[in-house]
Amino acid sequence: MAGSKDRQSGRKRRGFVQTGSLLTKQIRKTGERRGFAETRLLTQWTEIAGAEIAAMARPLKVTYAREGFGATLVLLCNGASAPEVEMQIPVIRERVNACYGFNAISRVRLTQTAPAGFAEAQAPFEAPPKSPPDPRLCAQAEAQAADIEDTNLREALVKLGANVLSRRDTKS
């Protein structure tokens, strides 16, 4: 929609608008209705909780206590994996609080359901498969991070670099 006016600022925009930016307000409003002040918790659940936990559980809602500090995160999981998820609750709470940047979540509660979720044809618990990154971009990112001595930091920077480079590659 080249040349259309931006309603908020009144100035003209150039080029097309990203689809995600058109839905940002609606997604935030829906997320806040379920208590998710941080939408990253929903959109990047696999990265926050880890692939293993994300395959077994997903966030359902966040409830806040009337008095005091700390919220309760309600996770949806199937009955077979509930005991395993329950053992991982301290790890989940720590990772979610790292996402918020402070100790927002004090309790994690599990809700068990069928493997397909509350409704038929709902998305399964397994995380979507990721396409492997371009080896050329990975090699470029590894070359840039080669001087880093800490292996964990170097691996994280290589992963980040490959993601950034792949996004730049798609825009050209």
Image (cartoon, helix red, strand yellow):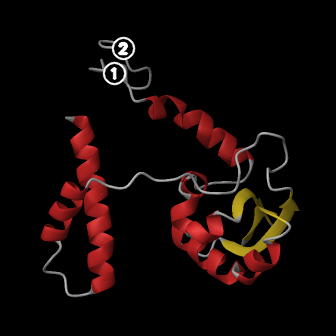
Of the 4 image quadrants, the one containing the C terminus is: top left
Q: Position of residue 84 (x, y in %)?
A: 75, 79
User: In the depicted view, which residue is nearer to us: 79 or 96?
Assistant: 79
As rendered, which of 103 and 91 lies closer to the eye? 91
| 89 left or right, relative to 2 | right
User: What is the secondary structure assignment of the residue under circle 2?
Assistant: loop
Q: Residue at x 33, y 21 (%)?
A: 16
Asked whether 147 or 122 is in front, the reply is: 122
Q: Quadrant of residue 150?
A: bottom left
- The residue carrying mark 1 is 16
Tell me how far mark 1 sits from mark 2, CA to CA. Answer: 5 Å
Residue type beneath disc 1: Phe
- In this rendered view, identify the residue nearer to me: 60 or 57: 57
Please rate how many residues cluster around mark 1, counting C-alpha atoms within 10 Å: few if below 14, some from 14 to 19, many from 20: few
Left or right position of 25 against 93: left
Discs 1, 2 touching: Cβ within 8 Å: yes
Residue type for callout 2: Met
Extreme residue in the bottom direction: 149
Residue 58 visible? The answer is: yes
Q: Position of residue 99 (x, y in %)?
A: 53, 67
| Image position of 115 with respect to 93: above or below | above
Residues packed near mark 2 inside 10 Å, few (<14), some (14 to 19) or many (20 plus): few
Marking on residue 115: none
Q: Secondary structure at mark 1?
A: loop
Determine which residue is flagged by label 2.
1
Q: Quadrant of residue 45?
A: bottom right
Q: Residue 109: percent from the left, percent from the top?
A: 81, 70
